[in-house]
Amino acid sequence: ATSPGYEPNPRYLDARFRLCFSRLVTHYWSHAHFLDDDALFRDAHRLMDIPIQLVNGRMDISGPPDIPWRLAALLPKAELVILGDEGHGGGSSMSAVIAEAAERFACAAST
């Protein structure tokens, strides 16, 4: 089931994109994203002093919000944004949140 008004991204109409995307996803998933079990959480302390914004779509079935939630709990400078109307591919509200965070981080870095 999809959300009312859902429109797939037009890039999925391109057979070359679909093939490349499926190969990339399959490669990373088959190698556990090239991370040891719990490496992200075990090594999270390395990111303690870095401002981080984690953005997750509540409707993302392949990337549920428990992982960014656990990571945000370990990182004092992390902000977690869960978007109720977004899935894995994001959309306009996710793009807006990411753009705002990028602008905020860029301004902070230039001062």
Image: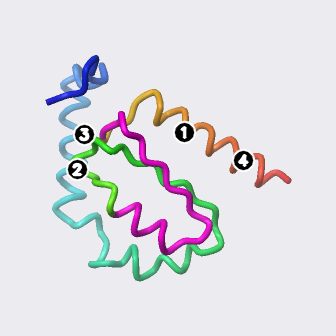
Q: Nearer the viewer, mark 3 or mark 1?
A: 1
Tell me the amino acid under the disc marked 2: Ser
Gap between marks 4 and 2 measured at Cα: 30 Å
Residue at which label 1 appears: 97
Mark 4 / mark 2, whichever is N-terminal: 2
Image side of residue 12 versus residue 66, left or right: left
User: Mark 3 or 2, which is nearer the eye?
Assistant: 2
Above or below, comparing residue 47 to residue 98 in the picture: below
Identify which residue is drawn at 55% across, 54% down: 53
Q: Residues within 10 Å of mark 4 (few under 14, many from 20)?
A: few
Residue drawn 53% across and 80% down? 45
Q: Are marks 3 and 4 in contact (CB under 8 Å)?
A: no
Q: Is residue 79 magenta?
A: yes
The magenta region covers 67-87
Q: Earlier in the sequence, mark 1 or mark 2?
A: 2
Name the residue type under label 3.
Answer: Phe
Residue at numbered disc 4: 106
